[in-house]
Amino acid sequence: MQFDIPQGESQTRTFTLTPQLPVSGQAQEWKLICDSDSEKTHISTLDIFFSSASSPAERLSESFTMKINIDSAVQTSKSVWRFAAQGMIFATNGGDDKRCFEVVSGNDSNQLVVTVTCLDNAGESFKFSFLAMETTLESGECRIFASADPDGNTGRRP
């Protein structure tokens, strides 16, 4: 899904993330939905682009904020899910540069707030995994899982 941030502006979108347990030892792609998308299409690629016409001062105020909430449907009377650690990890083997991402966990670790900025003209590709912990309420056992790597791009539109 592509998000185009207008010159000198910021946007905020809310998303719902549905974590999945691994299958046969393989991480699964977790369902990520933009709540304002009427079709509720699963997002497997995030493309975030800013205006190339922005002045240096405008670039300082431009951002795209994603508020990602864990789907309440995965919370049961037997187990609960929360974001773990920073909530996401970036791939390290592709030269990915996460300098334009700020990640904060909130709402009792049920929400991840990711702010994306782009101060220069350099675009970047990225891969990341969501990290979440499943806690079994009866035993207190906690297990941390990572999603399969979604990917995306961020930069300035030509």
Image (cartoon, rainbow, N blue to C red):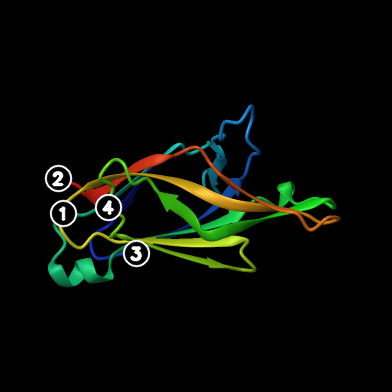
Sequence-first disc among 1 and 4: 1
| Residue located beneath label 1 in the image | 52
Sequence-first disc among 3 and 1: 3
Q: Are marks 2 and 1 in contact (CB under 8 Å)?
A: yes
Q: Amino acid at mark 4?
A: Asp
Residue 76 rendering spot, x and y as whole percentages: 80, 50
Q: Disc 2 vs disc 4: which is toward the camera?
A: 4
Q: CA distance from mark 3 to mark 1?
A: 15 Å
Sequence-first disc among 3 and 4: 3
Horizontal side of residue 43 vs 52, given as left or right: right
Q: CA distance from mark 2 to mark 3?
A: 19 Å
Horizontal side of residue 128 vs 143, given as left or right: left
Q: Amino acid at mark 1?
A: Ser
Residue 11 rendering spot, x and y as whole percentages: 39, 61
| Residue located beneath label 4 in the image | 97
Residue 13 rendering spot, x and y as whole percentages: 47, 56
| Callout 4 secondary element | loop
| Residue located beneath label 2 in the image | 158
Q: CA distance from mark 2 to mark 1?
A: 6 Å
Question: Within 10 Å of the Cα at label 3, are there few (<14), some (14-19), or many (20+) other Cα atoms?
Answer: some
| Callout 2 secondary element | loop
